[in-house]
Amino acid sequence: MRSETTESQPAEETPAALVAALLAALGDMVSVDPARRALFGQDCFARGAEPIGIVRPRDIPGVQAAVRLCAVAGIAMVPRGGGASYTDGYLHHGPHMLFDLSGLDMIAIDVANARVRVGAGVTWAALRDALAVHGLRTRFWGPFSGLAATVGGSISQNTISHGSGSHGISAQSVAGIEVVLADGSLMNTAASPATRFYGPDLTGLFTGDCGALGLKVAVTLPLMAIAPAFEALSFAFADFAAYHAAVGAAVREELDDSHFSFDQALSQGQIERQTGLAARLKIARGVLRVAPSLAAGVRQLVKMALAGERELRVAAYTVHYIVEGSSAAEAGAKAARLRQIIAPHGVEIANSVPAFVRAMPFAPLHNILGPKGERWVPVHGIFPNGQALAFDAAYDGFIASHRAEMDRLGVWTGKMFSSVGTSALLFEIAIYWPDAHDLYHQDVLGPAHLATIPAWPANPEARAFIDRFKAALIALMDAHGAAHFQIGRAYPYQARLDPAAAALLGAIKTQLDPHGLMNPGVLGL
């Protein structure tokens, strides 16, 4: 990163001069409010330096104007989408201007060509609602955090969830990206509106880059019809080996639109979030809303009530599927095939969890704290299917070696899984510990929700342990060949590249951002 400033602007004057120039050019799209700067200097896990200011442009020319001014000042530019990062993706430890891109909320639906062009700040929930009017959806249609997560943020980070069973990760559902480069120029990665794959895949360079190569301002996504029929299914397994065998066999047939899995600790946490009359009524309303008919919705609610939650509470591992079809017969056939594949390995249980997710695919971000108000951070690795069992055994040994200190400090963990394509498994560890809530939690959850859960005093000893624990867990994952989404500044990347590939990426970074001003430090750049 270039740290010097121009001769006409001494270092100590640069931030003030830049803020003045931005205010003159963009007015109320620029904020230097101390409370906002403090909030935007942290994510749901860590803190970085407070930004000099926050720019929230409402259109692409506004982004370009702000970038040009920052480039002249030699000040780093850091993008932020919905803010639900936990890998230091927008936390920079030097002087920087933070670009809040949530103001880019344009949605332009092209029904005839089955495409939608959206501003980078559009949330997946808003996009889903806009498309549903036309009976359309994107192939990948968002992570579980889609009430806050933006399209631009998900493309920058890479993610999976809704639609991934049949259509892969977020990067695989992109037709083109418009990017503001470090000099303020605008580049469109799509050579043709007809296809992404016209010559070398330039669009792919900007998926998963965490803003290192430029600021995403608009994304074009292909569309498909919403399937009118679905079934929700859940299965339980006695151990990880049985779970892994079942899911590995099922994923090769690509029957589901979405699936996700929990160990017992996280399954019980999900149940706790669904207790209480208000929560259950909300689930019931959601089930009735998405059911193909009132009678079908009532049947689903009766099934959920009769099945109960005992199996979910005691199962070592559970997997939850949502299968879709153009008709009830097609969805039913897929469900029947899933049951056939999984029967040798596990048992079918109450489908309340996937039915809830189908009814409310984008739930409030209550899971940024634990079920009893604990602090939370996840760590994940993506393993070739052949490495998953070995890593699970190594993880059990890792936990055993830390058990005494974890128990003393009140630290606990749970596991969540999802297949990534037909050949890999995402293995996510959720880590919880008692500690004070930060500004981020207060802003996202609000006082009404925080009043319903315990508050903890600051716990620096536990936090220091979590920092060591998290780093050691990432090292263990990488020793087993893990890949990662949401690399940010938390996961290693450069060391995993072939030397020629690392040199190529460095050359691309230099070409697009010669002074290293775009989100310095992410991806190890």
Image: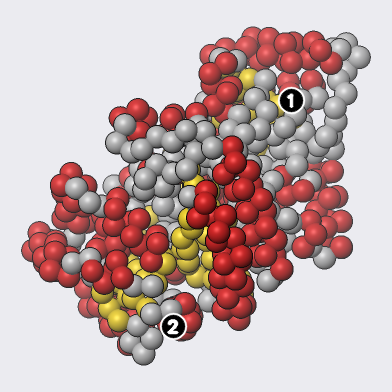
- The earlier-in-sequence mark between 1 and 2 is 1
Which of 200/282 is in front?
Answer: 282
- Of the residues shown, which amino acid type is indicated by label 2? Ala
Crowd band around label 1 with a 10 angstrom C-alpha radius: few (<14), some (14–19), many (20+): some
When asked about the image quadrant of residue 369, the answer is top left
Can residue 210 be spotted in the picture?
Answer: yes
- Total marks placed: 2
Q: Residue at x 39, y 72 (%)?
A: 317
Which of 125/304 is in front?
Answer: 304
Numbered mark located on residue 498 in the image: none
Which residue lies under the disc numbered 2? 242
Q: Position of residue 388 (x, y in %)?
A: 58, 75
Can residue 115 be spotted in the picture?
Answer: no
Q: Residue at x 57, y 67 (%)?
A: 400
Which residue lies under the disc numbered 1? 95
Q: Quadrant of the image for the N terminus? A: top right
Q: Are marks 1 and 2 in contact (CB under 8 Å)?
A: no
35 w.r.t. 300: above or below:
above
Q: Position of residue 418 (x, y in %)?
A: 48, 67
Which of 306/113 is in front?
Answer: 306
Element type where label 1 sits in the image = loop
- Of the residues shown, which amino acid type is indicated by label 1? Pro
Q: Residue at x 67, y 53 (%)?
A: 471
Q: Which-is-in-front pick, marks 1 and 2?
A: 2
Q: Separation of disc 1 and disc 2 at Cα?
A: 51 Å
In this rendering, position of residue 346 left or right of residue 206:
left
- How does the figure colour the protein chain or chains? secondary structure
When asked about the image quadrant of residue 297, the answer is bottom left
Q: Residue at x 40, y 60 (%)?
A: 266
516 w.r.t. 483: above or below:
above
276 w.r.t. 428: above or below:
above
Q: Position of residue 507 (x, y in %)?
A: 85, 50
